[in-house]
């Protein structure tokens, strides 16, 4: 009987050596056809795991406070990333999260001060400011090398992905779905295009705006 780790290694090698490169494009739309920005698209193999590789998303990873809001509204960061929280406002901020993936608190810090946090577990981390309730943002800590955030057109391109049967997962903080995510199986082959129709709820009434 083969050791489970040997089976996992063989499966990962199969993905790495037998697959050729594919390109995936994804368009995200609301029911009435409007593009959905700031959605996160991630890919996971339906069997085995991706070969160990350097994350494609590289730093520096920054969650700025400017204009009494966070920038960006959604930040992608790989597991293990150190994220900086520079305060560019002339008022103090008190950044915190109660999320399961990372609970932390950065107590009052002022103009041009920067604090850092290491995000060591995958998952979505919701951010708030204890001084300014209208500030809201998210850090999606990812454990796959194949991930991207949708642009203003609601579009994502993921290039050089191994041809394989994958699960495409889409997450957005205002998505009306369990865990704010939906997924579907896709068999990648050459150039593949997928369209997701997403139902979103309205953002909080006191929110200061979704910034970049």
Image (cartoon, rainbow, N blue to C red):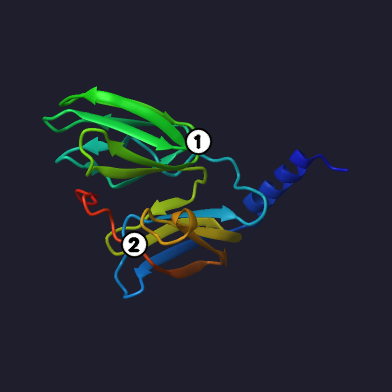
x, y percentage for residue 2?
84, 42
Image check: 177 left or right of 93?
right
Q: What residue is at 48 percent from the left and 32 percent from the top?
A: 120
Image check: 34 left or right of 21?
left
Q: Quadrant of residue 3?
A: top right
x, y percentage for residue 206?
21, 50
* Quarter placement of the N terminus: top right
Q: Disc 1 designates what residue? A: 121
The answer, for residue 129, to whether it is visible in the render is yes
The relative height of residue 29 versus residue 173 in the rendered view (above or below) is: below
x, y percentage for residue 20?
58, 59
Q: How many marks?
A: 2
Q: Nearer the viewer, residue 190 or 131?
A: 131
Assess disc 2: are there few (<14), some (14-19) or many (≥20) residues with their C-alpha within 10 Å of its C-alpha: few
Q: What residue is at 15 percent from the left and 26 percent from the top?
A: 111
Q: Nearer the viewer, residue 26 or 173?
A: 173
Q: Disc 2 designates what residue? A: 201
Mark 2 or mark 1, which is nearer to you?
2
Whichever of callouts 2 and 1 sits on the residue coming sooner in the sequence is: 1
Q: What residue is at 31 percent from the left and 75 percent from the top?
A: 32
Image check: 161 left or right of 69?
right
In terms of secondary structure, where does tag 2 sit? loop
x, y percentage for residue 50?
60, 47
Assess disc 1: are there few (<14), some (14-19) or many (≥20) residues with their C-alpha within 10 Å of its C-alpha: some
In terms of secondary structure, where does tag 1 sit? loop
Alpha-carbon distance for marks 2 and 1? Answer: 27 Å
């Amino acid at each position: 009987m083969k050791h489970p780790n040997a089976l996992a290694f063989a499966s990962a090698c199969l993905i790495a050596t037998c697959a050729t490169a594919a390109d995936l494009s994804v368009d995200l739309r609301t029911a009435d056809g409007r593009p959905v920005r700031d959605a996160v698209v991630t890919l996971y193999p339906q069997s085995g795991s991706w070969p160990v590789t350097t994350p494609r998303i590289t730093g520096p990873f920054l969650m700025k406070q400017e204009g009494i809001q966070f920038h960006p509204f959604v930040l992608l960061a790989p597991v293990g990333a150190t994220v900086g929280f520079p305060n560019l406002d002339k008022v103090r901020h008190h950044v915190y999260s109660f999320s399961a993936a990372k609970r932390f608190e950065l107590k009052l810090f002022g103009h041009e001060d920067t604090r850092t946090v290491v995000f060591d577990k995958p998952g979505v981390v919701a951010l708030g400011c204890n001084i300014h309730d209208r500030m809201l943002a998210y850090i999606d800590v990812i454990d796959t090398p194949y991930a991207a955030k949708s642009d203003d057109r609601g579009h994502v391109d993921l290039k050089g992905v191994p041809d394989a049967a994958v699960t495409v997962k889409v997450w957005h903080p205002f998505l009306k779905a369990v865990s704010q995510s939906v997924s579907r199986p896709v068999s990648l082959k050459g150039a593949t295009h997928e369209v997701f129709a997403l139902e979103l709820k309205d953002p909080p009434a006191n929110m200061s705006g979704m910034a970049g």
